[in-house]
Image (cartoon, grey):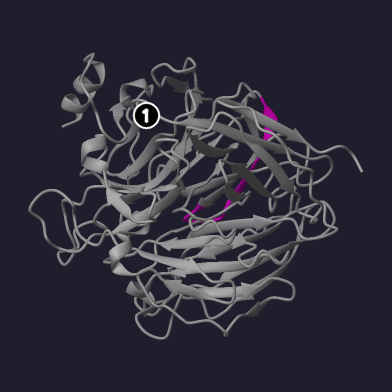
Amino acid sequence: MKRLAACLALLPGVAQAGPLFVDDAAGLPAPHLYSGGWEHFVGGGVAAFDCNEDGLPELFAAGGSDPAALFINRSRPGGRLQFEAGALAPLKGVTGAFPLDVDGDGLLDLAVLRVGPNVMLRGLGGCRFEEATERWHLPLRDAWTTAFTAIWEPGQDWPTVVMGNYVDRRDPDGPFEACDTSEVIRPEGRAFGPVEQISPGWCTLSALISDWQRSGVPELRLSNDRHYYVTGGYEQMFRLSPLRERTDWKKVSLWGMGIASRDITGDGLPEVMMTSMGDQVLQFNRGTGFEEAPYAVGATAHRPHIGDDGRPSTGWHAEFGDVDNDGLADLFLSKGNVDQMPSMAMHDPNSLLMQGADGHFTEAAASAGIASMARGRGAALVDLNADGLLDLAVVNRRAPMELWRNVTPEPGHWTAVELRQPGANTHAVGAWVELRAQGRVQAQEVTIGGGHAGGSAVALHFGLGAATGAELRVIWPDGVRTDWQPARIDAVTPVHRAPL
């Protein structure tokens, strides 16, 4: 199927409807696998971020019982995906990683999640890193960390971070009903300080801080795995300051693996997608609460869409992105059996759900050439070769990492908005970008977290369809709004905030 799709893309005069990808995994310096025993059934995240400031995202991939890997992007603009091995001190037990500029020096750092004490890697420029875990006073706890999110609270020079932990490996009565607690770690000056426990824990696998209500008050959402909490647990929402669980919204219990968020209805409020064993759950944001999308919307992706395995699917990483640049956010879901779970599909292809103008989603992974049967885990849907099309990296359990280059024929126009501000929070986490073109407004938030064990720190990508002009404005994290300004078409639009 992959060869057929690639051949069709190269034949002149052959019409190809919908998105299309080609396999560029040969562009990695060596095959990379996420390996290990039961402690690495989950995790396997990948972080995408530009650590040498050349405009191309690098990839940091978890290895589980094998070392994590850093891949330096050497792709030519618009060309094949090509990476070389980066210099990285050996790190094993890694479940995932998230990029963020912790110390406000303008260089991206890495929060590395592990089975064992977590690690903070300080970026030095040129894709070099030094460990700063103890210097930054990150608590050294021997936990099984599988989720991460962060925000800069008002007046703080350092981020508040959340470490979401899974099963308590030290519980002699585990693993079932042996969920570990998670931590909210507040700043203290220019380091990490007070720790608040989230207890009881419900086996958290994904976390995301977002301004869900667009009220200027970010809140923490946790996705939890019913497989181990068994009873009593649910998906959680917390107010951050002071830390307090919200109980005024409908509770949902599922085998929660990942979270994705984006406004797909045009009202400016971010919807939420939660992956699970069985149905993948899309919820519409109604401002005062969340409403589950009807089955007819086409987002459940509950069984394999090709092959003869009719057992339920297992979803992991979820990520919204406009794959064909038509101005409508699509949705990628990595899939794969936990390991050998007989009640779930063993041959479980990834899903690519393309959004139509009526808001309904249609499965396109097979025709796009990315319906891999490997046990997918973390993923990154980002532009890896600076051509304005979102490419795809997928980390697999006990199977080689995959790279897919987007070669969709006749895509729409696009812009990518890159925010910077002086002082702390250089990448403007918590900011919103609103973009209007042809009578429609798209909104995206700069966040850290979500997905499955990995995230990206790249410019916000907007598809524009046939529009040849667009305007944007920024709502900075402190609520200050810019005027509407022209966006660059088919190029990155940098917006740098002037010093106050």
Label 1 sits on what residue type? Asn
Q: Is residue 122 magenta?
A: yes
Residue 106 vertical position relative to residue 43 in the rendered view, above or below: above
Q: Horizontally, is 399 left or right of 144 in the view?
A: left
Residue visible at 62% across and 28% down in the picture: 492
In x, y percent, where is residue 473?
A: 71, 44
**Residue 292 screen position, x and y as percent:** 40, 72
The answer, for residue 192, to whether it is visible in the render is yes
Work out whether residue 68 can be spotted.
Answer: no
Q: Which residues are magenta?
A: 114-125
The N terminus, quarter of image:
top left
Give whichever of 220, 286 is nearer the camera.
Answer: 286
In the foreground, 381 or 407: 407
Compared to residue 310, the image places residue 454 above or below, namely above
Res 35 → quadrant: top left
Residue where numbered disc 1 is placed: 406
Q: Position of residue 218 (x, y in %)?
A: 68, 65
Q: Is residue 300 magenta?
A: no
Please name whichever residue, 351 or 185, is drawn nearer the observer in this view of the structure.
351
Work out which quarter of the rendered image holds the C terminus and state it: top right
Furthest residue in direction right, as rendered: 500
Q: Residues within 10 Å of mark 1 (few under 14, many from 20)?
A: many
Q: Secondary structure at mark 1?
A: strand
Left or right position of 387 against 343: right
Foreground of the two, 268 or 217: 268
Point out the residue furthest to the left here. Answer: 308
Q: Is residue 378 above or below residue 77?
A: below
- Look at 61% across and 61% down and name the residue there: 209
- Report which quarter residue 84 is drawn in: top left
